[in-house]
Image: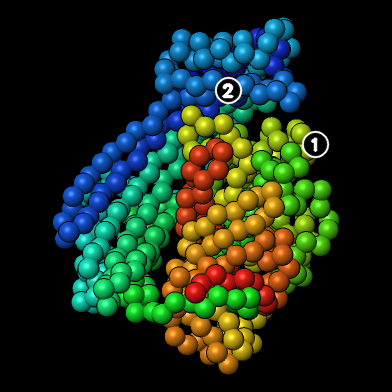
Amino acid sequence: MIAREVCRRVLQKAVSTGADYAEIFAENTVNHTIGMIADKVDSIRDATIAGAAVRVYKGLRSVMATTVDTSEAGLIRCAEKAAEALGQGKAEIEVVLRERLYGDIHPIRIVPMTAGNAAKVDILKEAYFAAREYSDAIKQVEGTFLDVDHNILIANTEGIYAQDRQIRTRLIMTAIAEKNGETQTGACRPGRRMGLEMFETVSPKETGIHAARQAVTMAGAGYCPAGVMPVAIDNGFGGVIFHEACGHSLEATSVAYGRSQFSGKLGQMIANPKVTAIDDGTIPNAWGSINFDDEGTPSRRNVLIENGVLKTYMIDKFNGRRMGMAPTGNARRESYAFTTTSRMTNTYIAPGDDKNEDIIGSIEYGLYAKEMGGGSVNPVTGEFNFAVNEGYLIRNGKVCEPVRGASLVGKGSEVIKNIDMVGSELDMGQGMCGSSSGSIPTNVGQAMVRVSSITVGGR
């Protein structure tokens, strides 16, 4: 993408006013989407993002400049702007770059960009019409096929010169069902760091059916009663509770400034002993996996909480300076236009040894949150509010009628203490996580868990 010697000269210019660290992040990304609605393909779009960022540090000061001109002259001008903004001084670093090959544990057999649109449209149609034909109650279906070819280069004054190609594929189906004049929406959004071979294990037909079934079920449901009760949260995307309510509070973005509910608590018991939570960017072909992060630190498996004890945080280089801790391979950014900071990859609660039937059977009266939706959280306090996309009442240890309009309200530091049963069937769900460094692909996951007591919003 950019020759090593060019990168060396640009970095040398970046440290010319006394910076003690400098980096180049360059990218060329193509996003390809095919949309389908009203029984026909209605859009095919390509979007290209190309440019570079030069960032410099001096102590706890940081400056970043960006450019779409990735010629040597353009990059030198970008580096000069960053160096000038940092202040006046003399270069104290002699830049030497050595190419680094991290290896790739995410093999791609069918590259989407070269597979052709016909194959993608066939996959999209299979999912679309499976949802459309599921029930007469289905009134509208919308589908999107997305593939991303994300090429990056990272060079820095620590000597790293490395490149990576990240290919991801995703199928998004939403369905709207109507019963008795009221409508509800169902959705299914599988994604992988894979090519079209993803659909050898992910069924387009089942993706469409999942979205339609959820819409039809919720359209016929009554409203959820409100109150404090035990809740069983299913596996897969149920892990969004930990991701949002606790995960963001374990990122150095918040911790380094004391703006986290978990600041200063390393080595302390912060969760039920049943809870072990992990962020692992090394899972082969997983949606949130990376070979190395956006600062060139190798990805790794980080045990955040072990048997209830806080073991580490997720740390990027700059915030690591403030904390006096080494980076953990969690520095991520949406694109060159965003400043890197600490972010999650594939974050999940590790499976336990409880059985799903025992978790449900232990609840005399409560809620079964089969699938979670979106929500909001304050990482400082950990207070959250999440919608339940598909929920059912539990009575006398049995899953009963579906209920809609449910939400889970609480505080992250409390909910992880109240997780007192953890199932054995781990699954992951895919999402796009937004934070100060933009929107990035992340996996969330868990086995089924029981929260002994939580506030359920409803009617």
Kind of residue at badge 2: Met
Kind of residue at badge 1: Gly
Of all residues, the one furthest to the bottom in this rendering is: 396
Image height check: is 43 above or below 221?
above
Residue 324 horizontal side relative to residue 292, left or right: right
Q: Where is residue 208 in the image (x, y as percent from the top left)?
A: 30, 67
Label 1 residue SS: loop
Q: Mark 1 points at which residue?
A: 324
Judging depth in this view, the residue of 338 and 72 nearest the camera is: 338
Identify the image quadrant of the N terminus: top left
Q: Where is residue 241 in the image (x, y as percent from the top left)?
A: 58, 62
Q: Name the residue under label 2.
A: 64
Residue 347 horizontal side relative to residue 255, left or right: left
Quadrant position of residue 44: top left
- Residue visible at 47% across and 34% down in the picture: 335
- Residue visible at 63% across and 75% down in the picture: 228
- The local crowd at label 1, few if under 14, some if 14 to 19, many if 20 or more residues have their Cα within 10 Å, is few
